[in-house]
Image (cartoon, rainbow, N blue to C red):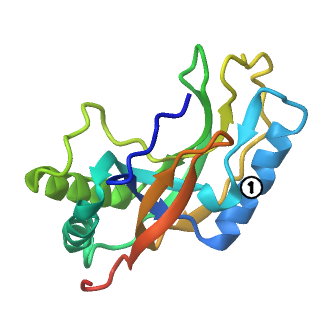
Amino acid sequence: MIPPERPEEVRLFLALDLPPAARTELASWRDSVVSGREGLRPVLDEALHVTLVFLGRRGRALVETVWQTAAAAVAGLPAPTLASRGAKWVPPRRARVLALDLEDPEGRAAAVQGALSAALVEAGLHEAEPRPFWPHVSVARVRGGAKVRDRALPPPPSSRFTASGVTLYRSDLHPSGARYVALERLDLGESGI
C-alpha cells in the first residue's frame, strides 16, 4: 500500500543523470530482460538514474535549502565516467530489484556522493548512510509477492558514459510505480548556481 501523501511534504533524492545514448542502450537491454518475465516491472526510461542521496520525506519549505546546500557542495567537481560492471539481483536471495552495477574507476561518483552527503548532514538535512555508496542503476523491480525463478540474464551493455549533471528529484508514489519530477539540475564542472 502506498502511504498517503501529505501536501506539506515531498519525497526527495539527488541523482546523476544518464546521457541519452546510455539511457537508450540500457533501456533496450532492460526490455530484453523483462520480456516474458511477468514478475518484473521495468523502470521507465526517463527514470533511469544513479541515486546519490535519498532524502525521503521533507517539508516543501526545505526544497530550496536542500538544493542550495547540494549545489554548493558539488559546484566545480568533475563529472564522473562510469562503466558497466554487470547486472545484479538485489538482494541476492529474495530479489526486489534488478540493477546494473557500475564501476567508478576514478572515484568521481563517490566524491560527488560524499560531498553531497557531508554537506546535507552538516546542514541537518540528512542522516549519513551506514553502508558505503554503491553506484548502480535500478532497471526493473520485482512485483510484490513475485519470485524471480529464472535469474539468467543476457549480457548487459558494456559501455562507458559520463554522468554530467546532478539533479534534485521529487518522487511521487503511484500504484504503477514511482514517478520522478526533476526540480533542479547542475552540470558538474560548473562553478555554481
Can you name the residue that lies furthest to the right here? 36
Q: Nearer the viewer, residue 157 or 41?
A: 41
Could you tell me the amino acid type at mark 1? Ala
Rendered image quadrant of residue 21: bottom right
> Please, is residue 85 above or below residue 16 in the view?
above
* Relative side of 121 to 13, left or right: left
> Please, is residue 1 above or below residue 145 in the view?
below
Label 1, secondary structure: give it. helix
Can you name the residue that lies furthest to the front here? 7
- How many tags in the picture? 1
Tell me the residue at 72%/19% (across/down). 146
Tell me the residue at 75%/32% (across/down). 40
Rendered image quadrant of residue 41: top right
Q: Nearer the viewer, residue 19 or 140?
A: 140
Rendered image quadrant of residue 98: top right
Tell me the residue at 73%/20% (across/down). 148
> Please, is residue 52 above or below residue 100 in the view?
below
Image quarter hosting the N terminus: top right
The residue labelled by disc 1 is: 27
Tell me the residue at 34%/42% (across/down). 133
Image quarter hosting the C terminus: bottom left
* Relative image position of residue 153 (x, y in whole percent): 77, 33
Q: Nearer the viewer, residue 109 or 176?
A: 176
* Relative image position of residue 183 (x, y in whole percent): 42, 70
Mark 1 surroundings: few (<14), some (14-19) or many (≥20) residues within 10 A: many
* Relative side of 109 to 191, left or right: right
Q: Nearer the viewer, residue 75 or 122?
A: 122
* Relative image position of residue 157 (x, y in whole percent): 71, 52
